[in-house]
Amino acid sequence: MGLAKLVLEDGTALEGLAFGAETDAVFELVFNTSMTGYQEILTDPSYRGQGVLFTVSHIGNVGINTEDDESAKPQVSAAVIRSLSPVVSNWRSALSLSDWLAQHSVPGISGVDTRWLTRKLRDGGTQKAALSTKGTSAEVLLQMARDWPGLDRRDMVKEVTCAESYRWVDDEGSKWVNGKLVIGNWSKTNPQLPISNYHVVAYDFGIKENILRHLSSYGANVTVVPADATADEVLALKPDGIFLSNGPGDPAGLPYAVEAVSGLIESGVPIFGICLGHQLIGRALGADTNRLKFGHHGGNHPVQYLPTGEVLITAQNHNYCVTEGDLNKDEVEITYKSLNDDSLEGLRMKNKPVFSVQFHPEAAPGPHDAHDIFSVFFKMIGGK
């Protein structure tokens, strides 16, 4: 195992041990505070253009399996960790983390003081960075980081969306969702909610497969459409409900998606948005979006449901936030707020069947506090 160098745009340079692919990469460095689920994190398309710094000190011990992917391959640009497990031990494991990343040309660095680096990003904000596992000098890496344009106002969705529409078919990972949520023809989480045959059209802005598993678990027939599908094209599919997915980058770089969402809102078809989908609804309703200092990335973020005061522990992954003050309070109700920084985490329209959340209710491997939000969508479709 050779040496690796990580250089931040402010000139900070760190050395560690290389794993994964032998290559150079430039990216936006963010930290994730989840204690489990590194495979789901690494395959989340919302991380396109980013390198993930894991705050948990030891990863790789359960290897990589085929059931827990959120997309077909790792989507991150790099992995930065404290300690890589030298042993892989899990009955589902197909190969090691390092070998898997190498297959997909993703570099990693271990042996880094991740606690110090996390504190640096938390205090100073997200930074651009460059990583080399093939011996590139720190001076060259610094220039790479400073020359890289970053993610603001860029369309990163085009790199992860599907090329054409398709019908979702349950996969190996679906059994973990179906077994928890559905018994016979009734939802475990909502015994009053019968399984539907509704047709849901889901926009793929970088959709996580566990979202599709959850929509399907309620009996929905799910058609996935590319990010540039117009409102007319989607409405021609005669959906009972429309889902707007998560995805990478800055919503300000997606004017075509905002235009489509505006048309869909006017149609009156029930709409549910998660993460980037939530931000696109916010922009369609006239709000701006702003960059958070270091984003929300992890499985331990508390949010409060304002109508009842209930607190949920949620999984999150976003760097941008809907600007609450821009929303018309006569038309929009704020439903969720972050208890960490008071940022907007959910909204619903008062006169249209439209609602959204910034966090991830489908969270895999967890927490599962917010799973039931999917049933809200199906009740809305049913007019309940």
Image (cartoon, helix red, strand yellow):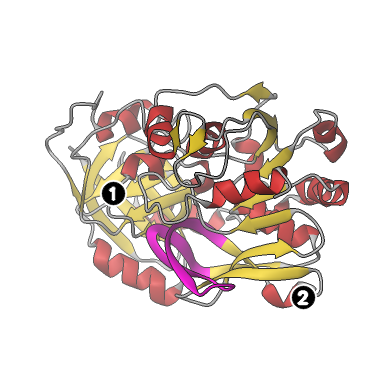
Closer to the chain start, of discs 1 and 2, is: 1
Instruction: Judge from the rendering whether residue 267 lies leftward or rightward of residue 106; answer left or right.
Output: right
Tell me the residue at 26%/52% (across/down). Answer: 81
Q: Quadrant of residue 169?
A: top right
Type of amino acid at the residue the image marks with label 2 = Lys
Q: Quadrant of residue 90?
A: top left
Q: Is residue 81 visible?
A: yes
- Measure the C-alpha gap from mark 1 to mark 2: 38 Å
Between 291 and 353, the one lying in front of the other is 353
**Residue furthest front as drawn:** 192
Q: Residue 263: x and y, percent?
A: 86, 47
Note whether 92 is above or below 33 in the view shown: above
243 within the magenta span: no
Residue stretch rendered in magenta on the structure: 293-319
Tell me the residue at 31%/41% (across/down). Answer: 133
The residue identified by callout 1 is 36
Type of amino acid at the residue the image marks with label 1 = Thr
**Residue furthest left as drawn:** 87
Q: Is residue 49 visible?
A: no
Note whether 95 is above or below 186 in the view shown: above
Across the whole image, how many numbered discs are drawn on residues?
2
Instruction: Judge from the rendering whether residue 376 lies leftward or rightward of residue 325; answer left or right.
Output: left
Q: Residue 305: x and y, percent?
A: 54, 69
Q: Secondary structure at mark 1?
A: loop
The residue identified by callout 2 is 329
Q: Residue 340: x and y, percent?
A: 45, 75
Between 162 and 300, the one lying in front of the other is 300
